[in-house]
Image (cartoon, rainbow, N blue to C red):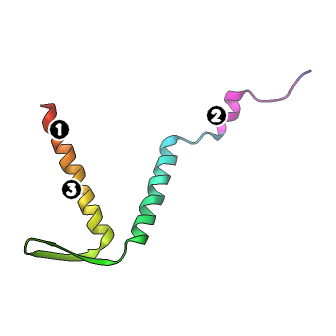
Amino acid sequence: MFTHHRSHYQATNRTRVPMRWIAALVVLAIAITFVVQNRERVTVTLFITAASGPLWIALACVLFLGVTCGYLLAHHRRR
């Protein structure tokens, strides 16, 4: 009749991994995979300027510009 088991809280409290860590590991794995799969060199031309480098850097620059533009537009609308 007497059972020797931990309460549900005690059993899950010791093995719980914060969601931030899981999300960070997933993002890191995706980023590493992205860089490894996009290492070929490309040339990007804008008007008269040309630059060459790994594809992942070109895509990361475009992502940064897009995020920055989105932030600036959202910040501008709040005023």
Q: Amino acid at mark 3?
A: Leu
> Circle 1 is placed at which residue position?
75
Q: Amino acid at mark 1?
A: His
Return the disc, 2 or 3, that comes first in the chain's sequence. Answer: 2
Q: Say which quarter of the image contains residue 76.
A: top left
> Circle 3 is placed at which residue position?
65
The residue at 27%/57% (across/down) is 63
The residue at 16%/44% (across/down) is 72
The residue at 25%/56% (across/down) is 64
Give the class, few, some or many, for how many residues have Cα within 10 Å of label 2's Cα (few <14, many ≥20). Answer: few
Q: Is residue 21 left or right of residue 52?
A: right
Asked if residue 36 is among those painted magenta in the image, a careful observer would answer no
Q: Nearer the viewer, residue 71 or 14?
A: 71
> Circle 2 is placed at which residue position?
13
Q: CA distance from mark 2 to mark 1?
A: 40 Å
Residue 45 appears at what percent x and percent y? 15, 73
Residue 7 appears at what percent x and percent y? 73, 26
Q: Secondary structure at mark 1?
A: helix
Return the disc, 2 or 1, that comes first in the chain's sequence. Answer: 2
Q: Is residue 30 left or right of residue 11?
A: left
Residue 57 appears at what percent x and percent y? 29, 68
The magenta stretch is 3-14
The nearer-to-camera label among 2 and 1 is 1
Residue that protrudes farthest toward the left in the picture:
48
Q: Is residue 17 left or right of residue 69?
A: right
Give the class, few, some or many, for how many residues have Cα within 10 Å of label 3's Cα (few <14, many ≥20). Answer: few
Q: Secondary structure at mark 2?
A: helix
Return the disc, 1 or 3, that comes first in the chain's sequence. Answer: 3
Q: Say which quarter of the image contains residue 51.
A: bottom left
Q: Is residue 47 shown above or below 79?
A: below
Label pair 2/1, CB-CB below 8 angstroms: no
